[in-house]
Image: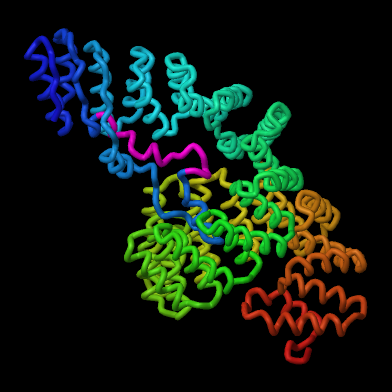
Amino acid sequence: MYAAQCNDRRASVLLIRLYALGRRGRAVPLLEAFHRSGLEMQKLAWFHVPALALTLIVGGCSGLATDPGKGDTSREEQPADSPDSGTDDTTEESVESAVMDSEEIEYRDFPPDVLFALLSAELAAQRGRYDVTLMNYAQSAADTQDPAVIRRAMQIAQALDATNAQRQIAEVWLKKEPNHPQALRIAALAELREGNLEQALAYMEKLHEQGAEAQFDTLANQARALPAEQQQQMLELYGRMHERYPDATAITYSLALLNDNTGNSERALELTESLVAEESNFQPAVTLKGKLLYDLDRGEEAIDYLREQARRFPDNRRLGTLYARVLVNEGKLQAAEDEFEALMDRFPEATGLKLSRALVALENDHPETAETLLNELLAEGVHTNQAHFYLGRLADRRDNPNEALHHYAQVEGGNHFFQALARASYIRAEQGELEAVRSNLENLRSRLPDQSARLWQMEINLLLDLGDPEKALEVASSALEQNPDNTEIRYTRAMLRERTGNIEGMEADLRQVLEAEPENAVALNALGYTLTVHTERYDEAEKLIMQALELDPDNPAILDSAGWIHYHRGEHEEALEYLGKAYERLQDPEIAAHLGRVLWAVDRREEARTLWRRTLEETDNTEALKPLLEILEELDLEPEAL
């Protein structure tokens, strides 16, 4: 409860009733009555609005750290395959729960219309109308120039990620307090998001000249979200600033970050090494150097360096996690598992490290360790989506579909939601619940219209996995009726039409895809390969395939098609060149079948036999072996006789 001191006792009573009823959502009529009353309150000096009333939508904004490297440890805790955190910090629930810990703020005297606007804003927040809340606070900040209102307005704008509002409120704040460090930082970031790069850096430079923490690195990291052209502009601006302040560690480090972000790893390493040489204890540069060494394919050097530095700075979780991840990427799984275990001991509150260790244990073929850690995460109520997903995978490995289904069904969001849904759908379909599964997918399409196309694809793939391409084709056609411009679904239908023998229909679908996306290398290749195999329109086929190859020159599927069109033209040497490159990149049964066929044609038959024999031995998937078996049948060869 609060108190209000007014000249008119009726206004005081009305305000108290207003707040009490406002918490139950019935205060709007009272607000309007209060505003119409015109009651003058000459003293509101100790009108103290509780934090709950005035911060209902502000909680969580402290979690929206403007610097990815500060206040956001979720990324450094992520395992090698980067699962999501399993939480959504922008939900209403998290906003409201964070409010309870907010500090109270005292406001100065306000006229009734401003008070009305602020209270209206809080009631709007209670009803989820955060747009109204922000609008009222932003206007009140501009009208009152009150520092407390300005700060609260900014918190709200940050919580709602309202970039334009942040910029406007920052302008108001800087008019009131031109040198306020927080206002300058926020203004810089807001200008950056609006694309006003020079103004953003001007604010940060002003902070630097004041001797305050300018957070140039924050600006550099945020610039990663900008278009490539603007990132290059930022690089030039930082370069000029570095010339003005050559001894400023923060600016040199930020310039290294920008070079790294824009693909100039060599220059980034040069800058970073100069920093580390001068300030060997500057840990951000130490960490960046380790990353850059690895990015530049100096893997062993990176491992040695990171091991040494992780021992020097055992309290630097980001550095230790980077070292562990590099070990994973280099296939040193036991060392990585040991490192994550040590990190867990040092940082028991960092639950992401436990998830990382569990995933490394899975990859390192230690399922018991992984299962124990994943169940601990469930017991702690953290990373539950990932824990259930990987426990489902473990149950799948043990051929325990019911246990797997139990876990997959509890993945309620995050990066693995659709994978879990697809696997759960297949298990249920295998257990005779296909119609129920399809009904569930239909309901999800209604509930999640933005994911409709993805859910259609899931149903199509499910039917294919169950061996029913005709039904899958029907579903693809239904999906296109609702999503006629979706090129992914149309491409899928094209492949299904080819599979069911409708080559003309396939060509029609692929041409429609290419009409919408003329530089779609996958569709160009598919059409070119289809014309090669099913027609004698070789000139047209070659043109399409070469166009695809120009767009994606290292794609093994396209290289295979290029080789196969040359084979059909009788150009065996060219065919061998393309097929050899394709097989180097991908040891796929179909590529092996094609390469062997050309080797056979040029009388290198023992090489062909060896290649085909190895492919048969290493491939369990009968469908994948179909092209090879067809070639063997064409040559009147028995697989067992190779």
The answer to whether 464 appears left or right of 248 in the picture is: left
Query: At x 33% / y 38%, what residue is drawn?
Result: 59
Q: Is residue 263 visible?
A: no
Specify whether residue 203 is painted magenta: no
**In which quadrant will I find the C terminus?**
bottom right
The answer to whether 355 appears left or right of 268 in the picture is: left
Query: At x 48% / y 17%, what residue is drawn?
Result: 178
Quarter residue 333 falls in: bottom right
For the residue pair 538 and 454, the one nearer the viewer reads as: 454
Residue 372 image offset from top left, x and y in percent: 40, 73
Q: Predominant secondary structure in magenta? A: loop
Total of numbered circles in the picture?
0
For the residue pair 479 and 56, the one nearer the viewer reads as: 56
Quarter residue 568 falls in: bottom right
Q: From what the image shows, is residue 489 above or below residue 614?
A: above
- Residue range in magenta is 54-70
Q: From what the image shows, is residue 134 above or below residue 294?
A: above
For the residue pair 346 and 371, the one nearer the viewer reads as: 346
